[in-house]
Image (tube, rainbow, N blue to C red):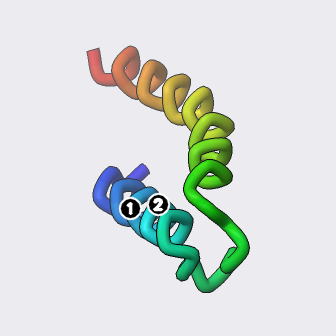
Amino acid sequence: MNIEALRKGVSELMDGCYNGTNPDYPELKAFQGLKFLDKLMPYLKSYFEKELKRRK
């Protein structure tokens, strides 16, 4: 997973959610973006945990 791509994607998602300019989901607002991130976080957490174990 490319961390910069992830950071850019999350940044774009939050920008779009905050100001309603996300071209894919114009109806998204900030709280919906946060709900999405809540769903994403367990996946990211498990990914980073696996990656840390792999690198040790």
Q: Amino acid at mark 1?
A: Ser
Q: Quadrant of residue 24?
A: bottom right
Q: Amino acid at mark 2?
A: Met
Where disc 1 sits, the SS reads: helix
**Count of numbered badges drawn on the protein:** 2
Q: Residues within 10 Å of mark 1 (few under 14, many from 20)?
A: few
Which residue occupies 55% across, 65% down?
A: 17
- Numbered mark located on residue 43 in the image: none
Q: Residues within 10 Å of mark 2 (few under 14, many from 20)?
A: many
Residue 35 placed where, x, y %? Answer: 66, 42
Image vertical order of residue 43 relative to residue 28, above or below: above
Residue 6 placed where, x, y %? Answer: 41, 56
Residue 14 placed where, x, y %? Answer: 47, 60
Which residue occupies 49% across, 64% down?
A: 18
- Specify whether 17 is left or right of 39: left
Which residue occupies 43% across, 68% down?
A: 15
Return the residue nearer the eye: 28 or 4.
28
Residue 31 placed where, x, y %? Answer: 61, 49
Return the residue nearer the eye: 6 or 19.
19
- Specify whether 22 is left or right of 26: left
Which residue occupies 61% across, 40% down?
A: 40
Where disc 2 sits, the SS reads: helix
Q: Quadrant of residue 53?
A: top left
Q: Quadrant of residue 56?
A: top left
- Asked whether the residues under the numbered discs 1 and 2 touch, taking CB atoms below 8 Å apart as contact, a structural biologist would say yes
Image vertical order of residue 32 relative to residue 28, above or below: above
Q: Which residue matches tag 1?
A: 11
Q: Which residue matches tag 2?
A: 14
Alpha-carbon distance for marks 1 and 2? 5 Å
Return the residue nearer the eye: 33 or 44.
33
Image vertical order of residue 40 relative to residue 52, above or below: below
